[in-house]
Image (spheres, rainbow, N blue to C red):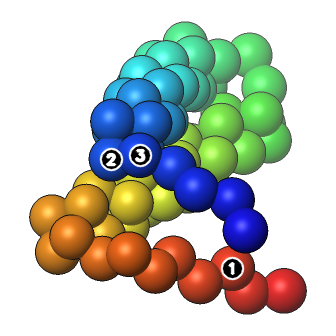
């Protein structure tokens, strides 16, 4: 079993959120040059934002369980 501290989860959230912001900015810049790339960047940014939100929600609820679905 892997264990993470709340601080480590907060770091992960911070990295996900920063990467999400960068991807949104890159997508905005790439809108004029490519068809698919900006859409894929936005999708990935939205996914990162969602993952971060779920981690933060687990932290706020002081949940000790995070399920991994396969």
Question: Residue 48, position in %: x, y?
Answer: 53, 48
Left of 3 or right of it: where is 11? left
Left of 53 or right of it: where is 42? right
For mark 3, what is the residue? 5
Residue 25 to residue 5: above or below: above
Does label 2 or label 1 sit earlier along the sequence?
2
Please name the residue shown 73% across and 68% down the image. Answer: 1
Distance (Cα) linking label 2 and label 1: 18 Å
Q: Quadrant of residue 68?
A: bottom right
Query: In this orientation, which residue lies closer to the viewer: 18 or 46?
Result: 18
Residue 42 to residue 57: above or below: above
Please name the residue shown 17% across and 75% down the image. Answer: 61
Q: Are marks 3 and 2 in contact (CB under 8 Å)?
A: yes
Please name the residue shown 69% across and 59% down the image. Answer: 2
Question: Residue 67, position in %: x, y?
Answer: 59, 83
Which numbered marker is on residue 6?
2
For mark 1, what is the residue? 68
How busy is the neighbourhood of tag 2: few (under 14 within 10 Å), some, or many (20 plus)?
some
Please name the residue shown 44% across and 36% down the image. Answer: 8
Q: Quadrant of residue 23?
A: top right
Tell me the mark number nearer the camera, choosing from 2 and 1.
Answer: 2
Indicate the secondary structure of the residue bearing disc 3.
Answer: loop
Distance (Cα) linking label 3 and label 1: 17 Å
Does label 3 or label 1 sit earlier along the sequence?
3
Indicate the secondary structure of the residue bearing disc 1.
Answer: loop
């Amino acid at each position: 079993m892997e264990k993470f501290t709340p601080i480590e989860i907060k770091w992960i959230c911070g990295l996900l959120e920063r990467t999400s912001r960068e991807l949104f900015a890159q997508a905005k810049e790439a809108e004029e040059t490519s068809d698919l790339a900006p859409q894929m960047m936005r999708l990935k940014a939205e996914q990162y934002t969602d993952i971060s939100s779920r981690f933060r929600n687990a932290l706020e609820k002081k949940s000790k369980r995070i399920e991994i679905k396969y």
